């Protein structure tokens, strides 16, 4: 049996830290926002082990090196997490208070191995 990994979901979310300039907090909030948009019932329905799922998270912030990717990975309730931070997101500076509001965007992709001999895509008719 040949297993091929297929992406089964792509979900996005945004999060922010308005007062602490904490990139990790904004990233974690973006992940939580994305997770609250999804419900994957496939695992229970098909009797699949969710631990076989690979979860790839991309966090976009203005200062990616300030994101603790291990803390962001800990936000994921299922699967094997891979988190990377890239340049993106948005910083909004408040000159009156001398603070910066950090806005992060998260893209969460879930991949599962699929037995190519059992599951096949069919052409639309």
Image (cartoon, rainbow, N blue to C red):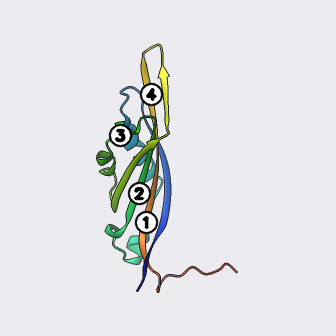
Near mark 4 (Cα within 10 A), the count class, few <14, some 14-19 or many ≥20, is some
Dot 2 or dot 3: first in sequence order is 2
Tell me the CA gap for discs 1 and 2. Answer: 8 Å
Circle 1 is placed at which residue position? 111
Residue 90 position in % (x across, y down): 50, 34
Circle 4 is placed at which residue position? 101
Res 56 label: 2
Circle 3 is placed at which residue position? 67
Which secondary structure lies at badge 1?
strand
Residue 48 higher or lower than 13, as above or below: below
Tell me the CA gap for discs 4 and 3. Answer: 15 Å
- Label 3 near label 2: C-beta < 8 Å? no
Which secondary structure lies at badge 4?
strand
- Label 4 near label 1: C-beta < 8 Å? no
Near mark 3 (Cα within 10 A), the count class, few <14, some 14-19 or many ≥20, is many
Q: Residue at x 45, y 58 (%)?
A: 109
Dot 1 or dot 4: first in sequence order is 4
Which secondary structure lies at badge 2?
strand
Dot 2 or dot 4: first in sequence order is 2
Residue 97 position in % (x across, y down): 43, 15
The C terminus is located in which quarter?
bottom right
């Amino acid at each position: 049996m040949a297993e091929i990994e297929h992406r089964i979901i792509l979900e996005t979310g945004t999060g922010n830290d308005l007062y602490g300039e904490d990139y990790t907090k904004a990233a974690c909030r973006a992940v939580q926002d994305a997770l609250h948009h999804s419900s994957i019932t496939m695992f229970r329905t098909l009797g699949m082990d969710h631990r076989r799922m690979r979860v790839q998270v991309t966090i976009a912030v203005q200062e990616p090196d300030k994101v603790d990717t291990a803390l962001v990975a800990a936000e994921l309730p299922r699967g094997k997490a891979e988190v990377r931070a890239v340049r993106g997101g948005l910083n909004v500076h408040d000159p009156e208070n001398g603070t910066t509001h950090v806005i992060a965007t998260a893209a969460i992709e879930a991949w599962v191995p699929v037995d190519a001999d059992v599951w096949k895509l069919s052409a639309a008719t």
